[in-house]
Amino acid sequence: MTDFEPPLRLILDGEALASNWKALNAHSGSAQAGAAVKANGYGLGAREVAARLSDAGCRDFFVAHWGEAAAIADIIPPAWISVLNGIQAADIPHIRALGAVPVLNTPDQVAMWNASGGGRCHVMFDSGINRLGIAPEQISQCDLGSMDIDLLLSHLASADEDSAQNEAQHRAFHEQAAASGAKRLSLANSAGIMLGADYHYDLTRPGLSLYGGIARPEMEAFIKPVARLSARLLQVRTQPAGAPIGYNATHVCTSDTTVGTISIGYADGYLRAFSSKGTAHYGSATLPVLGRVSMDLVTLDISAAPELREGDWVDVEYDLPTASALTGLSQYELLTNLGTRFERIWR
Ligand SMILES: *Cc1c(COP(=O)(O)O)cnc(C)c1O
C-alpha cells in the first residue's frame, strides 16, 4: 500500500461473513461446513476471509491453485487446506514441503501421487458435471483401496435448480462412496446444502453464500450481505437539456441535470453491463448511472441529493441477486470481478 488514500472502498462485514458460515454449518445438519476461499476469497481477500472463518470454527478450506494455498498457509494450518485443481509432477516436492492436501482428479494424478510416496490426499469423483474428476468408468484404474484418502468429493452441476441431474449425481456418488475407503464424503456446494440431508454427507463446501450470494431463493431468509461498494465523488456539474454524457453519448440529458462523476469503473469490476442501468445511493436518495461505464469513472444523476459535494462518498448498489438480474452477470462474476484498486475495509 502507498500513502495515498484509495478513492474507492470495499466495506466488508466480518460479522456477516461469520454468521453466514455458521448458518450454512447449521443447515448442513450433522455435516461440517468447510469454505471455498479460491480466487482470493471470491474477490474479497482470501487471508482476511480465511482468518475470520477459522475463528468461526471452519476447519476445511478449498482453493483452486497451489499458489492460493501457499498464500494462506501461514495463517491456516496447511493440513486444513485442500487444492482443487490437482497436481503436476514438477510441483510434488513443493506440495510435500507445503503440506496442503491435493485433490487428485485423474487416474494419472492418483498414480503420480502413489509413486511419489502417497500419503493423505483427497479424490474428486466426477458424478456427472463432466468437467474435472475421475469418471465412473475410470475408477477401476485407480487403486483407491490402498490409499490414505481423507475426502471423496464430487461437485454438483445444477444444485441451484430443481433439476433431475441433482438426484442422478447423488446416486452416482452414493454408489462409489462406500467402496472408495475414504474417511469422509463431500458433495454439496452452497446450493447443494439446501437440497436436504441426503446431500450433506460429512462435509459441505459452500463458497458463494458465505460471501452473501443467494445460491437458492430459500437462502434469502438467513444469508447476509458481506460486501458494500463506496466511491468518491470527483466532480459535480449541472448539465443542460441536450448535453451528451460519456463515451458514445449513449445518454443525453432531457432537462437540467446535476451530474456527479465517481471513481469506479470497469477496471474495478463494475462492468459496462451497468451502463445506464446501475444506481448509487446517498442516504435515501437514489442516483442512476448515466450512459457508459468507463474504465475508471461512472457518471451519476445526483439531482436527488443536492447536498452532495465533490469529495463526498456515495454507495454503489451491488446487492448480488439484484445486480445479477439487472446485468445478466452471475453473482459469482460480480464478486470475483472486484479488482485490486479497492481499499478493503473490514468492519
Ligand atoms: C467453487 C467450488 C465450490 C463452492 O461452490 P459455491 O457454488 O460457490 O458454493 C465447492 N466445490 C468445488 C469443487 C468448487 O470448485
Image (tube, grey):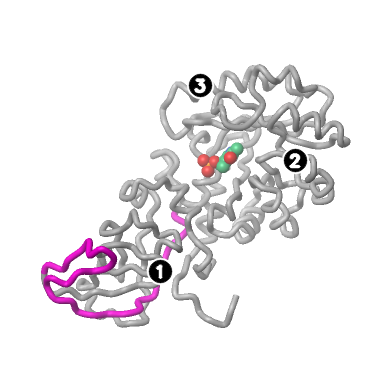
Q: Residue at x 39, y 75 (%)?
A: 232
> Looking at the image, which is closer to me, 260 or 25?
260
Snapshot quadrant of residue 129: top right
Q: Horizontally, is 314 left or right of 166 in the view? A: left
- Amino acid at pointer 3: Glu
Q: Is residue 145 inside the magenta stretch?
A: no
Residue at mark 3 to residue at mark 1: CA–CA distance: 46 Å
As helix, strand or loop, the secondary structure at mark 2 comes to loop
**CB within 8 Å, label 2 to label 1:** no
- Amino acid at pointer 1: Asp
- Specify the quarter for ligand 1: top right
Q: Residue at x 76, y 50 (%)?
A: 78
Question: Magenta segment, which residues?
Answer: 225-254
> What percent of the width, then of the height, locates residue 281?
31, 67
Q: Examine the rendering and report whether any part of residue 288 can be seen.
A: no
Q: Is residue 241 inside the magenta stretch?
A: yes
As helix, strand or loop, the secondary structure at mark 1 comes to loop
Q: Residues within 10 Å of mark 3 (few under 14, many from 20)?
A: some
Q: Which residue is mark 1?
A: 296
Q: Horizontally, is 147 left or right of 345 in the view? A: right
> Looking at the image, which is closer to me, 235 or 38?
235
Q: Examine the rendering and report whether any part of residue 159 can be seen.
A: yes
